[in-house]
Image: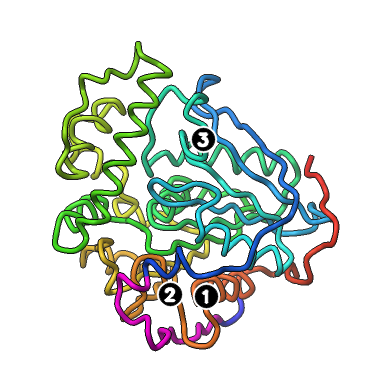
Amino acid sequence: MTSFVPQEFVPAPLLRNPHVQTFAAALLGRAQFLPLVEQWFISVAGEKNQVRCDCSWQADPHHRTTALICHGLGGSSTSPVVIGMAAALWKAGLNIVRYNMRNCGGTEERCRTLYHSGMHGDMVRVIDELIARECRSIVLIGFSAGGNLVLNTAASLGPSVPTQLKAVASICGAMDVAAAADALHRGASRFYEWRFVRELEDLFKRKAKLFPDTFRLNHLRKFKSIREFDNDITAPYGGFRDADDIYTSISSSRWAERISVPTLVIQSKDDPFIRLLPATVEKVKRNPHVTFLETECGGHCGFVAQGKLWWAEETVEAFFASVLAEPIFGDASQTVGTAG
């Protein structure tokens, strides 16, 4: 690994407020991502559950690093932050695989479960599929809940991480899920909570329509917080005792010391709802494989910078370039190949 010296994050002059940063990341114009897409449906946890990956391959895919990118809660492979990162890394010469967690991206009929960011076995399954298709160099990127997922994935692999997995990057990862859920229920952050709860309720209604023998509409009520929803719906349908049980079980902070692959963790001190406990910060800082960047501002997955707009994308790209021994960066191909 060569020296990695990140550029300081300086927010755009009119975008210093954390909520403005958060909304700007979704609303400001980003680079479009237009390469052809090959859809993979990969079975996870049995044949009754599948996740969809939207894949774009450079013309010489087996000689390029493949970036596996994951969205946050309520998002999908078309989330603006995913598209922005995909466009940046595609331009740098990487293959792009945009991962949809279970039920996301319109795949509700392909899963008999709900979803949460502790399902690292699903991502390991996708990594195995990439390796089987001769992807020799893989990096993971996750935003928010997706950040927690990629960190869980790296921790689950521990010292047995496959040699093909070269690096991981988490942006505003919810490493302490209980702290994030509680922060969502305070002050202005309750706007985000309201949105998340409505989306989760709508998902449950769609699941009940598709699989009425499994998901019962009479279990729904008017939930006032995401903790209430997780306590009454996500936890019992996922085999957990209650909200505290699922939060403890899926937080990547519980085993971050097992991460043994070069990993970049980006957090913002003014994130409206992601909170890292002091013990988590210390654990991450003690891990020699983890580079921890905490900015004074940036909102939630915002990081809209002065001058060059998208600081997180540039920082992740620079980190990967410092980690990878073999040259993988260069102009994107004008044509698209096929893996496997």
The disc, 3 or 2, on the residue closer to the chain's N-terminal end is 3
Q: Which amino acid does label 2 sit on?
A: Phe
Dot 3: few (<14), some (14–19), or many (≥20) neighbours within 10 Å?
few
Q: Is residue 303 above or below residue 157?
A: below
| Residue closer to the observer: 244 or 211 | 211
Pointer 2 residue:
303
Which residue is situated farthest in the top direction here? 213
Q: In this view, does 251 lie above or below 27?
A: above
Q: In this view, does 255 lie above or below 216?
A: below
Q: Say whether residue 75 is magenta.
A: no
Q: Is residue 133 above or below residue 278?
A: above
Q: Which amino acid does label 1 sit on?
A: Trp
Secondary structure of residue under mark 2 = loop
Q: Where does the magenta region start and end?
A: 4-21
Secondary structure of residue under mark 1 = loop
Q: In the figure, residue 290 lies in which quadrant? A: bottom left
Q: List x then y, in percent, for residue 171.
A: 43, 64
Q: List x then y, in percent, for residue 306.
A: 47, 87
Pointer 3 residue:
106
Marks 3 and 2, how far apart in space?
28 Å
6 to the left or right of 115: right
Marks 3 and 1, how far apart in space?
28 Å
| Residue closer to the observer: 305 or 8 | 305
Q: What residue type is labelled 3?
A: Gly
Pointer 1 residue:
310
Dot 2: few (<14), some (14–19), or many (≥20) neighbours within 10 Å?
many
Q: Disc 3 or disc 1, which is closer to the eye?
A: 3
The disc, 2 or 1, on the residue closer to the chain's N-terminal end is 2
Q: Say whether residue 9 is magenta.
A: yes
Marks 2 and 1, how far apart in space?
6 Å
